[in-house]
Image (spheres, rainbow, N blue to C red):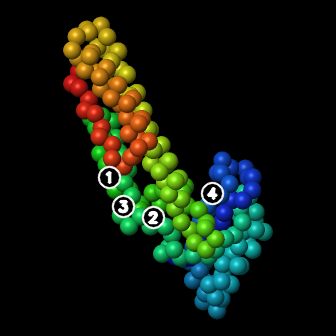
Amino acid sequence: MKKIVWEKIGAGNDDAPIGHIYVTTISPKVYSELSANGMTDDEICSALIQDMLLRNQVPAGGVHRANIIDADLPDNNGSAMEYVLDESTETVSQVACADQRRCYRDTWRWNGSALVEDSDMVLETKKEKVRKVRNKLLELSDKDELKLLGAGGQNLNDMRTYRQELRDLGGFIDADPDNITWPTKPNV
């Protein structure tokens, strides 16, 4: 499927940072109709870009960078993983991203000739996702610790140890967000 790549180079009315990539997918129906009229791929993309400019549908601060197809999108080759929290059991699993091509979509950059993933941004995105899971586990365990405060004893100590282990994950998250050993929540 044909796509138009835009790069944000100036301020706009959205929260996206300078350098953010927008990808506009050309509808198969529109593409089919225009190509049936004898237009080449480049002519179709140029016509659609002009139409988007006229309708003010170009991403704010965006400039056209390329016309691509799906195969040109960055691909993790099945290696993109993420941590998923099951809130009912408060357990964490590492699973393959459901959409490998778009798992780290916000890290795409235009390098002058192709869309690529910015490896530094991928690392920061992974760290941010892991911290969100860790913070949610801390939030979920707040209630358990409050329940145990009145009772004291070993259960309270185990819960405090667990919560400290969660807080201590910060150093491991920064070092290697792909290989986190999550602490086991004690029975309460």
Q: For marks 2 and 4, give the CA distance.
A: 16 Å
Residues packed near mark 4 inside 10 Å, few (<14), some (14 to 19) or many (20 plus): some
53 sits left or right of 1 in the view: right
Amino acid marked by disc 1? Val
- Which callout, 3 or 2, points at the residue further toward the start of the chain? 3
Callout in the foreground (3, 2) = 3
Numbered circle sitting on residue 20: 4
Q: For marks 3 and 1, give the CA distance.
A: 10 Å
Asked if the residue at tag 1 contacts the one at tag 3, i.e. Cβ–Cβ closer than 8 Å, the answer is: no
Q: For marks 2 and 1, give the CA distance.
A: 15 Å
Residue 3 against residue 8 in the figure, above or below: below
Numbered circle sitting on residue 95: 1
Classify mark 1: helix, strand or loop. strand
Residue at left 69%, top 69%?
64
Classify mark 4: helix, strand or loop. loop
The answer to whether residue 2 is visible is yes
